[in-house]
Image (cartoon, helix red, strand yellow):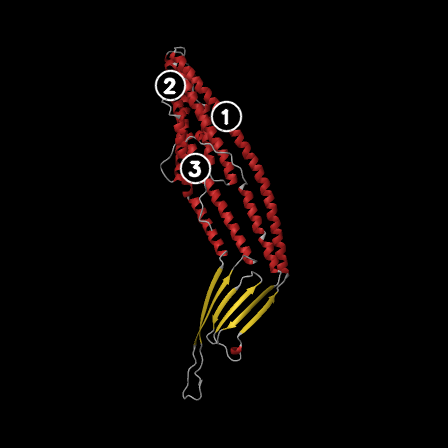
Amino acid sequence: MTARNGHHRLLAAAALLLAWLPTAAAQDAPQPAQPDQEAAAAASRTEVAALLARAPEHPAVRAALASLEAARSQLRAARSPVRFEVSSALTRLDVDDIDLDPITPGVQPLDRTLINVSAGLSFRPFAFGDIADLVDQREVAVAQAELDVREALVSVQARTLEAAFQLELARSGVAVAEQGAALAREALAATELRAQRGAATDRDLREATAGLAEAENLLLDARQNQALAELTLRSLLGTDDLPEVDPGAFALPRPAGEPVDVLRAGLGVRLAELGPRGAQRALLPVAQASYSFNLGEHDTLSLALESRTLQPSVTFSHEAQGRAFPQTEIRGALTVGVAWSISPEAIDALAAAESQLEAARLGLEAARQGAALRQEALLAAVEQAERALALAQARFADVQDRLAETRTRVDAGLATPLELQSDALAVTRAQLELRSASLNVLGTTLDLYELYALPLGTAPEAPAP
């Protein structure tokens, strides 16, 4: 079960508890002292900050950060200004012995082991052609990885906050269920006493018994919901230290921005734009120029430049066999070449790339329309939740005033302890409604943060490229 489904289940359980609470005779019980509200709110905000601080340590966020660092490393490799290559080859000749020097008696063997070595440097003073496409592709990959980090972080933060507040709601639900069960037991005891006196019927006794069984079942459900909420929060935090937080003490500003689906579609368009560029270059001729300096019979230094990437290169090579006359008289050679390859396949590839680009642009437009509709729906949900919260706050203030008035009347002897206990239970019920409404506002606001992939606070960053 997901955190959002757990939230709906807790709200349903709270609704059952609020709908069922017997009004029976009860004794007045001393009310515990209320803590200072400002201190409690400050403590709750501190706990919330501690919850958010743990989010970057979640495995999902760490995995996204590792992927981001890998993408940035690949981008740095594409932007590397110098590339060094070394190659070598060993050749073993299998030949017959021959007399190389007829003047010298005897047979001199031919050297059978040849070693060839080549070392080259390629320079990238600027990105052009295929190199520019590669850099753009890696930049898009980095941007996509950054969105993954944002999505992972805000998702973990949202699930953690909701789990923490669901736990508080579950605890409140257990408190209400315990009070309801206590009242049901007292109602059954009072009904049994009335039945002994002949003032209650068997039907009244059956209803009181059924009411107690229902109250105890609701209490069991509330405790199971609390255990499930504790397990969910413990799995997210990776610790048994579960904080106590108050949804009413934590307010999120309504976010604004570009939906993450639109951002991803925009990156898809940027990536699709690389296809026609590469396909068009494939239809153009490629020119290459090089100049080779013969440094001796075995060594050559070459300079080369080609039009595909405008990437100059310097290569030094050593040939073990060397050059023979008349090549030994050549000190340098300039080579200019042009290659042009065109085929129906290349033309079709260009058409396919342009179609993919058009599809990506249409996908971006569709993503904008869908995101706009979802954004309006989420904003409406937030406004509805805020209106429900305002009503819950007004109701809570009303029952608090009523409790104070009843307490004054009891002190004056104008009301019974039963009325005081009933009003105290109404305050508890209203407080549960208020926490449920606060959690609903938080949940709908967090949906907006997930829509925009906006982390709560500063997102963790891998080292910059």
Q: Nearer the viewer, residue 32 or 183?
A: 32
- Measure the C-alpha gap from mark 1 to mark 3: 25 Å
Q: Nearer the viewer, residue 386 or 428?
A: 386
**Residue matched to label 2:** 186
**Residue matched to label 1:** 390
Element on which disc 3 rests? helix
For residue 25, side relative to residue 267 (left or right): left
Percent position (x, y) of residue 213? 40, 24
Q: Nearer the viewer, residue 407 or 143?
A: 143
Crowd around label 1: few <14 · some 14–19 · many ≥20 (10 Å): some
Disc 2 residue type (three-letter):
Glu
Crowd around label 2: few <14 · some 14–19 · many ≥20 (10 Å): many
Disc 3 residue type (three-letter):
Thr
Disc 1 residue type (three-letter):
Ala
Residues at discs 2 and 1 in contact (Cβ within 8 Å): no
**Residue matched to label 3:** 160
Crowd around label 3: few <14 · some 14–19 · many ≥20 (10 Å): many
Q: Is residue 259 above or below residue 168?
A: below
Q: Nearer the viewer, residue 230 or 135?
A: 135
Percent position (x, y) of residue 165? 43, 32
Percent position (x, y) of residue 398? 46, 20
- Measure the C-alpha gap from mark 2 to mark 1: 34 Å
For residue 367, side relative to residue 159 (left or right): right
The quadrant of the image that shows the N terminus is: top left
Circle nearer the viewer, 2 or 1:
1
